[in-house]
Structures are given as structure tokens and as C-alpha cells.
Image (spheres, grey):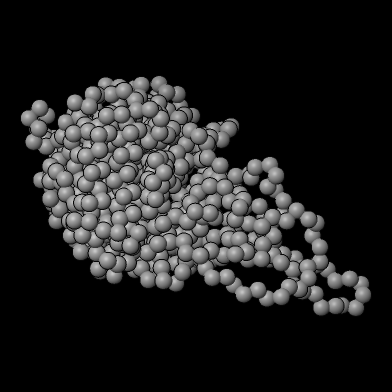
Amino acid sequence: MTRQDSQSGPEPEGGSASSASTGRGNPDKPQAGRASVPVPPAAPTPPQPAPAPPQPQPAPGPQVSPVRGTNSGRASVPVAAARVAVPPVVAAVPPAVAAVPPAVAVAPPVVAAVPPAVASVAPVVGAAPVVRDVEQSPAVRPGGPTPAATGDDAGAVAAQPVTPPEGRTGVITVSAVVVVLAIAAVLAVVQPGPVKGWLAFNDRANTTPTAAAPVPEPTPTAVLQAANANAPAPTAAGVAAAIGKLAVAKPLGSSVHISVVDVATDQTLFQLNADAPATPASTTKLLTAATVLAARGPAYRLSTRVVAGSKPGEVVLIGGGDPTLAVNSAALFPGAARLDKLAAQVKKALGGTKPTKVIIDTSLFSGPTTAVGWSSGLISPEGQVAAIQSLMTNAGRVKPVHHEPGADPRFSDPALAAGIAFARQLGLPSSAVSRGKAPVAAAPATGASAPAATDATPGAELGKVQSPPLVRIVEWMLQQSDNVIAETMGRQVALAAGKPASFDGAAAAMIDKINALGLPGDEANLYDASGLTRHNGISPTLLTNLLALVASGEHPELTSLFASLPVAGWSGTLASRFATPSPNKVGQGVVRAKTGSLTGVNTMAGELVTKDGRLLVFAVMADHTGEAIAARQALDQIVARLVQCGC
């Protein structure tokens, strides 16, 4: 079987390395036809004075409850006229809590704050953070949903407080309790994880506070490393000397494609087969993310609707292409639209009419539900993807849980499963569900004698729920490398362009949008939007041109793309990367990139800041690799060397 972006454990079986040939121009391939913030505590009640004559009492120190969770967030990409963006450097210990826009953070008495020099970056609007638990389930990736609950909402993903481990429930007393980091112009990241070390614990009984002498505030500790437009410019010769030998390392195999660009100058610093398309695997999702954000905009939401059927009591559930739709509060994706809420709207709209039948309308998407080049085992038993339909819940998963390797059991017919789940919310059996199309709503009648339209009128809307904004959905797609989300986003590009919402329509619309952005669309050959097929071909040059465009700020609708990328050693598919060998650790918290993994294929494209403060974008693609772990480490070594480079 072929795993997509499984970043830990042994490489699953799949096609041989020799089968991982590159995309466009290969005569053997078919032609294109194709993140809970601690709440500031209320002021404590001062102690009651004694019966004796009142004596001046010093103000008691504030108290807070034990911290029950952290706020996970994302860094956003700066927009700079000089084509300079600032990626984050994640502080070691303790992690800083910051967000864009301003967030509330809890800090120890010695408050680590961002130096004023960092706040010189132009602001960029990013999406809201994703809520994550303090203690994560091993079955859920960093950045994924919370562990499953029990009872009626089993498996629910919610921003609920997490009870701290035993021994952490004492009263927390700190001299500085809440710091509001109003850093609207700063690129910031939030490191998830336990927060017990952030605060000073005091298990003693409360005593009358005594006055303390003022203590000068310490010098803030630098949390973020800013890119420096005035840093020494790297040279092509210097970069070649740094990574030239690493680029031909044996674990990367015989087909390596690399492009490295200095964002400030637009100078290409290193090229190796840079204009030749390689099998991209999940780095395809960078094109998907950019084109859907450009086509629909970050704030666009996907709607799932119900209209009245042709007969009384019939209701039609219309799929709107929302892969994040949930059945109830047991949602995989935070803030997802829910079928139980939609059913409540329908019952209210029907009034005294009892629903008798549910018809599912999946006509928004057309064509095959699987792409050219997808193996028969990708859906079952591998669970890497689902049949691509316009109606599904939890991206087609049987249970709302995402496992790290992506091996999540999927429904064989996601739309029918969603229809049955909706019917149950209406009190109907599964036998009451069938396929069909929604009736066309009658045009509004005019004239004094025209009958008034009612909720029972065929085609009349009975309810509607909407997804989170696309900026959040794209973030989940990139962080977790979700293949179903990627395919549905590709279809949104097609719909926005007036093309069929199919694999072919999505591929054509995405390439058209790439060209419209001024990028070399002829250096992409697409058969899907996720990168699961080996027939895709994308050049490193196209990827670095795209990343440089995002960093430039010329297209504000794209700026959230950097904010959505996994961070090395911290989040998403890079959470366990840049760990071994030890020199690779220099990339942790500095490299932000999208990975791609198929059997015999290892790719990565993203951005980093060198030790001199220079912002570089890069794409490294190897599609004839050997053993997976060694190949990933060799690829990480190239990128880590760029971080260290004083070239």
C-alpha cells in the first residue's frame, strides 16, 4: 500500500521506486486530461479586616486556577514590500504563547516577551487558532482534534478544558499573571504541550500577604527570530558549497530536483533539475491551497442545505462540497457545520408536517470518485482517502478520529452514510434514504391573487449550515495533509471558474489559476489535487516561485498559506522531523514546509530563515528514493544546512 505523508514508523509497502517516475513529459504516463486560552482570572476578594481598628493592608496577589489547556495557533506570514517574510523560531523552554491577532497568554514571573525589534514586521491577517488539548492522544496528530469523549457525543472534538494530571491541582500564585501580547504586526507561533513549568506553584495555605520591594522587570527574552533585509546576501557559490554534496546523497536516489531562492532579491541560489517536473506527492497541496484561496477567498464558506421535496414530508439534503461536515458535536474538525443542527432547522420549518423521506442530492460534483493513478487499496484497507463526493461527514471517515499515519477507515459511500445519519436525526430509518435531485424552486409569483410560498413548496429551503472559512479548512489540509479536503478544494477552484467539479475540471482550473497568478503553469501536470497519484508532475521552480509570491504580499488572499504550513519539530507532518541526526535539529522551529511522501518519493517545499536572518524559499524533491527514513533524514539535512548557512 502507499502511504501519503506518514512521517513516523516504517514506510508502508507500495509501488517500487522504479515506478515513481516523474510526471509531465513521461511517455509512459497518460497525458493530462484530465488552534483553549487560559481565561484571565477575576480579581481576588481581598481579606476581611480584623475587628481591631483598621490597619493598612497590602493588596493581595492575584490567584488563578490551574491552567487547563493551551491555545494552539499559527504563525502568519509578513507582507513586506522588500519581499521579506518572517518565519518563526520557536523558543525552547518555556514556550512563548503568542498569536496574531493579539491573544491572551499566561507567563511566569519572569516574563519572556517579544523584543521591540521584532515588531517591525508589517501585519498580515491570519485565521483563528486551532484549539488543542494539553495532553494529546497518541492516535491524534499534533494540531488534530481532541480525544474522543464518551456517551452521546462520543468522539467529540471540542474546546473543552482538560483536567491537569494528578499533583497539579494546587493553587497557582504568580507575581505576573496575565500578559496581553498585542503584537498585531508580529509573526508568532504557539507551541502546544503541558504548561506546568510556566507558572510558580505554591501549595502552602493562604496567608496574609506582605508588602514586597519593587523588583525591576527583567530584560525580555527573544522568542522570535526576525528576517533581516540588511543581512549579508547569500551567494550561489556559497549555497552550492554548503549543499552540493548533500544533494547527491545516496539515500535520495538518482532523481533529485532542487530550487532555492533568496526572497529579498529574487535570486536563485541553487538549482538542480529545477525546471523538470518531479513526482510531487503531497507538495501538490501547495498548489491546491494557493489556487482555492485565490479563487474563493479566505473567508468563503461551504453550505449544506435542505429543501422541500416534491411530496409533503420529503426533504432533500443537498451536498455543498463541505468535507468537514459533522453529524453532531463529535466532530473531527473544530467549528464544523453539523447535521443535528440542520435537522433541528428542518423540523422547525416543517411545523406540523412529519418528515417521511430523505433524498440525498450529490449532483454538485461530477465524474469519477477516484483519480487516475489511485491504487485500489487507498480507500480500503489503507484509509488514505475516501470516494470524492459532494456530501460526506468528517472527510468520509467512519469515526471522527485522525490517526497519525492517515490510516482512517472510510465509508465506501460517504454520501449515503451522511444521508442515513441525517435521517436518524429526523427520526427516520435508513430505509427512508434514497438518491435524487432537489426540485427546482418555483419562481416567486406576482400579482394580488398569487398564493404565498410556504416551507412545503417544492424546492423551498428548510435549513442551511455553513463550514468554517476556507482559511481554516486549508490550514487543516496542509497541517494534516488531508487528501479528501484537498480534492474537495480542487473542485471549488473548478466551480469558481465555471468548470465541472471533477478531477479533470479541477486540474484544468488549477493550472489556469496558476497562470493567472503569473506563475509557470506549464511546469505542472495534474491528475488530482492531493498528490496521491504518481502521474502528477510539478517542478521545484514552480513551487519556489509560488512561495516567493506568497512572501511578497502582492496577493493578500494568499498570505495565510505560510501560516498554515507545518513547523519543523512542532506541528503537523513535520512534528517528528528534523530530529535525527543531531545536526538536523537546527531546523526545528525555523523550517516551515509542506512534505510529500509516497513509496520511493520524498519531497518538501517551504521557507526558512538562515542564521544570518535571510529568508529563503526552497523545494527539494526526490522521486527515486530508497529506504524512507534515511531518505527523509537526508532531505532534512539539506534544509537544515541552509538554516546554518552563512553563505
Residue 92 horizontal/vertical position (percent) = 49, 54
Q: Residue at x 12, y 46 (%)?
A: 275
Say which of 165 and 370 sits in front: 165
Q: Quadrant of residue 77?
A: bottom left
Q: Residue at x 46, y 42 (%)?
A: 142
Residue 572 horizontal/vertical position (percent) = 40, 43
Q: Is residue 298 visible?
A: no
Q: Is residue 565 above or below residue 439?
A: below
Q: Quadrant of residue 42?
A: bottom right
604 horizontally vs 590: left or right: left
Say which of 359 and 75 sits in front: 75
392 horizontally vs 15: left or right: right
Please state, as top left, top right, bottom left or bottom right, where the C terminus lies in the image. bottom left
167 horizontally vs 523: left or right: right
Say which of 471 and 11 sits in front: 11
260 horizontally vs 109: left or right: left
Task: Give the total of numbered labels.
Answer: 0
Q: Is residue 81 above or below residue 389?
A: below
Q: Residue at x 34, y 38 (%)?
A: 633
Residue 363 horizontal/vertical position (percent) = 25, 34
Please state, as top left, top right, bottom left or bottom right, where the N terminus lies in the image. top left
Residue 462 horizontal/vertical position (percent) = 39, 42
Q: Is residue 631 visible?
A: yes
Say which of 583 and 64 sits in front: 583
Q: Residue at x 52, y 36 (%)?
A: 137
